[in-house]
Image (spheres, coloured by chain):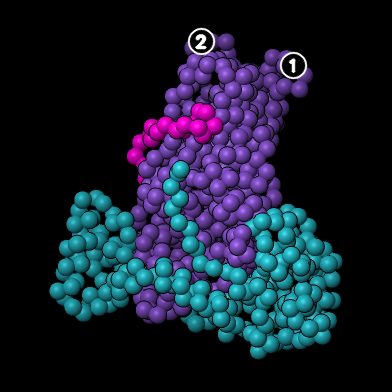
Chain colours: A purple, B cyan
Amino acid sequence: MAKRIEDTELTRRDLLAGAVGAVGGAMLAGLPATLGGQQGAAAPSGAPARPTVPADATKLQGGATTPLGARSAFEAPSRAPYGETTGSSLTPLQDLAGNITPSDLHFERHHAGIPALDPERHTLTIHGLVDRPLSFSLDDLKRFPQVVRPYFIECSGNGRGAFRDPKPDLTAQKVAGMLSTSEWTGVPLATLFREAGVKPKAKWFLAEGGDACLMTRSVPIEKAWDDAIIVWAQNGEALRPAQGYPMRLLLPGWEGNINVKWLRRIELGTQPWMTRWETSKYTDPLPNGTARQFTFELDAKSIITSPSHPDTIGERGWHAVNGIAWSGRGRVTRVEVSVDGGRSWANAELLGESSPKSTVRFQYMWDWKGGEAVLLSRATDEAGFTQPTRTALIAERGLGTDYHFNQVVGWKVERSGKVLFHGET
Amino acid sequence: MRMTRVRRVLLGAMLGGSLAAAGCDGGATAGASGTGGERAATAGAASGAATGATPVRFADYDGGAVPGGPGAGRHYGIGIRATAAAITKMDRDIGPDGAELPAGTGSVAEGGALYKAQCAMCHGVNGEGMAPAFPRLSGRDPAAEGFKFASDPKLPHTIGNYWSHATTLFDYIRRAMPHVAPGSLTDDQVYALTAYLLAKDDVIAKDATLDAAALRAVKMPYADRFVPDDRRPNAPK
């Protein structure tokens, strides 16, 4: 079930040409020229050649140290699609083995491109219904007490394609790749609100980003007293530009769009502003002719990432079925796995402690006898929410609903061992 | 008005449990005046810090929570005062009641000319959009009468079919459009484009002119269809 380099778009030539920059180029640059420059063995036409390594690595000195680490040339995880200014790129969930998403693989979703911001010129201003309107530089924020917490961020449109049109060739990345988890460092928004002195009349705040669309979302003030953080670091280092460098709003468990990146302004007021992003977008039409608004929390969800399409299971016998589960309403308390298309379910093992509003990995051992099978996973959270089937979700919300897709999904294993997406649950 | 009711329900649901928390912030002031309360709050918060456990809720995590801090309800005094001029320069939001709408005026006809020159290259001459990056803007579908977006994925979320507030249109055009030169339009131009797009979807008359008062009076066709979040846990069968 391990990912193979053939699964990616990268070729040996790309690596040598440095087309992928730090990924392959730096790795090979660290090797002696004679090795780095060798061509791989002749590959069957169409298949990219594998990276070349010495026959016995114990018989010569290895590569040198480098300023930045790089992945093994045999590993080439990639976000896809990419290259759009108003688009998105997806985390390759099938290539990951823990809860933390490497920062360079965190999914992206932006509506006016990624702004280039100088941290020495960027400030966060808090004003409106406050006693003291204040501006904070990045250095100012770092003087406050910090918190360090793991949380996922998920776009509430994550999985729309798999919900509306569950084609067998969908990968875990395409089904659920707008989900990433990081360890975030920042200052509680409550601390900044106390600093500014929030007036009792304030019930909502507006968060505004410093990108070209000046992204704005309204947030109930309660979230600030609960767990909202202004973060400046992700996985131990400065935020990546695509994640809001130099600072972003983090509202744990709430839909991705409201975690405003490149945060430059917070205004406190008495009512929501009804911005484009909370009216014409990010509202959830229902079959009864209404649309839910301000649907902030992300529901309990899970996906098996191994095996997953386009894997082929080579051997009968025992295989670890594993994946990730998460909920915006707190801890995941249970993940069940079915290997018979949902006729029967068994509790999976949760790997490590389930952290609120973060991901938890699960596993279930499966003895494959070589027959056809449908593997599914189903998460339940501490608020009592359990993933519905797709049929149940369509009945409740309709096929045309736009956000918050948390239906049970999985993988069909054919007799040949071929693994295909199974979305019609 | 429906939205007002929605808002009230939302506020009730979300803030019901938080008034205590808001009081806690009020407590940042109130606590400072009453020493007894302050001492109690400090003891509570400090015990969390002493065990290395940051409270789950930040309502309890103030200046008294971290060892060495200034004490409960006290400030750190970090940051600089934002001047009124600096705030005015950034604060250009238009809320749903349109209270912040600027002076200015623009007609449907002026908006049509502007649209052709600055918008049509992305959104199409008839507001049909260019998927997926540039959404369809215009069109009043008879099917939208039932607001059946959930059962019909193809029903477009156009301004006339779906948008709940005309003020949102003004706000978004002014802050983010046109794509190639965001924020470059004058307030008169934003009024004109707003008028053109509203008239195109039969929300206002084809010969209308908008200013702040006229825009505040616009009611969108389906503004009453939006309801608060009422998701409930769903146990497996």
Quarter where residue B62 is shown: bottom left
Q: Which residue is mark 1?
A: A44
Q: Which residues are magenta?
A: A337-355
Q: Nearer the viewer, residue A208 or A284?
A: A284
Describe the element under mark 1 as helix, strand or loop.
loop
Q: Residue drawn 65% across and 89% down?
A: B213
Mark 2 belongs to which amino acid? Lys
> Which element type, helix, strand or loop, lies under badge 2?
helix
Residue A209 seen:
no
Q: Nearer the viewer, residue B6 or B54?
A: B6
Question: x and y percent of residue A106 in the render?
Answer: 54, 44
Q: Residue at x 40, y 33 (%)?
A: A347
Dominant secondary-structure state across the stretch colored magenta = loop
> Looking at numbered disc 1 in the image, what kind of residue is underneath it?
Pro
* Residue A349 within the segment the image draws in magenta: yes
A175 left or right of A383 in image: right
Where residue B30 appears, as percent x and y from the top left, is: 25, 78
> In the picture provided, is A180 more to the left or to the right than B17?
right
Q: Which mark is residue A59?
A: 2
Q: Is residue B156 magenta?
A: no
Image spot of residue A245 (x, y percent)? 52, 55
Q: Chain of mark 1?
A: A
